[in-house]
Amino acid sequence: MDQIRADAAFWTATNVMCAIALRQQNLTYLTDSPNNPDREAWEYLDTALDKAVELTIRGSNDLLAIQALVGMANFLQTAPDAHAASTLLAAANRLVLQNGLHIEKDEQCLGQSGSENLRLKIQRNRVFWIAFNLDHDLATRLERPPLIHEDDIGADLPLLYPEDGLGCISSVDNSTKINFLRARSHLALIENRIHRRLMSARAKRQTLLEREAAVNELEAELNSWKASYPDLSATLDYLATNRALWADFEGDAFRMLRALPLAYLGCHANLHGLSYRSLRVQEWSHTRLLNTADPTEIDLLPSISDLYGDAGPHSCCVLAARASLILLHLSQNTDHACTW
């Protein structure tokens, strides 16, 4: 035990693993149940936090240290205040960049077989994308820029058909299979582009037509993402009308699958909601421009009705909100994946 405690990364990761396992077990209990293991889960996390400062300040080239910090951030993102999770994730992302997890490396580790090198390469890739996905979850919640930008990424998306099956979920009868990790990572890239093209300080200086073009292109990317995963696409299409579809999934697969459409719907609402607010501001300025612009330029000033008609992007937000409510109705009060 003393040897385990001496290895800060291993000691921290062990306690984080126990905390997350108890958190998952907690989902089967009611909040006020005397057997609820959530308090024990927090005790393990407190023990892990004792070593977090050491891992953060000293730095490490140990992949396990990065996994431990990401695990703590994942656990804490369910707290009412997500700033603690954001701080831990920032430390984890510093180590991610320091150790080059964001780029593909072809070098071979001495003393390891080809299969072992491949396993390590896949593991590094997965750790990076999990950290990247969590970064965008927290960025959306805290309304701040993501810590890692797409331009700095040189790593491929997770394997579509991994041999070990990790990161994939399937229905009870195996008729529906979805690569959760790849789909979520792909969606996080689109979230990154939405921030860069619509929400960043530079994006806010765009003209109405430039912003409208960006919205159309990003909407096309969202549709392409959805079409890339046929089973997920069918799930999203029938979400609002066929609740029985969720009976085909149970346990962790049920919770993960529900979190993925919620992320998609939130991304869709963000895309149209933010663009609509911006367009409304510029539409408010449109009347003022009509009174001050040169008569020969008035016809060049577009309006919201010209771009979207009566339906407008706000209708998309309403549909996304209704679908989200259906998903949340199916969750329990202890489901930390969907509630903050």
Image (cartoon, rainbow, N blue to C red):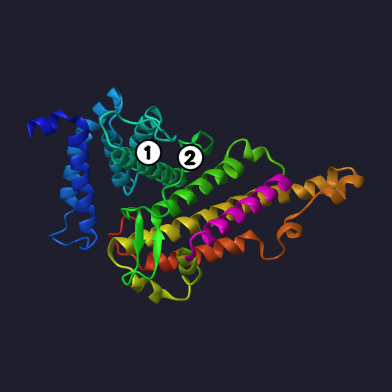
Furthest residue toward right: 296
Q: Give the extent of the magenta segment.
A: 208-230
Which quadrant would the N terminus be assigned to in this image?
top left
User: Where is residue 270 shown, x and y percent of the image?
Assistant: 54, 52
Dot 1 or dot 2: first in sequence order is: 1
Position above or below: 206 against 268:
above
Q: Secondary structure at mark 1?
A: helix
The residue at the point 29 percent across, 43 percent down is 71
127 vs 195, nearest the viewer? 127
Per the rendering, the mark at residue 144 is 2
Tag 2: residue type? Arg
Name which quarter of the figure residue 253 lies in.
Answer: bottom left
What kind of element bears circle 2?
loop
- Tell whether label 2 touches label 1 (CB within 8 Å): yes
From the image, tell me which residue sits under label 1.
Answer: 86
Judge from the rendering whether residue 67 lies leftward or rightward of residue 239; answer left or right.
Answer: left
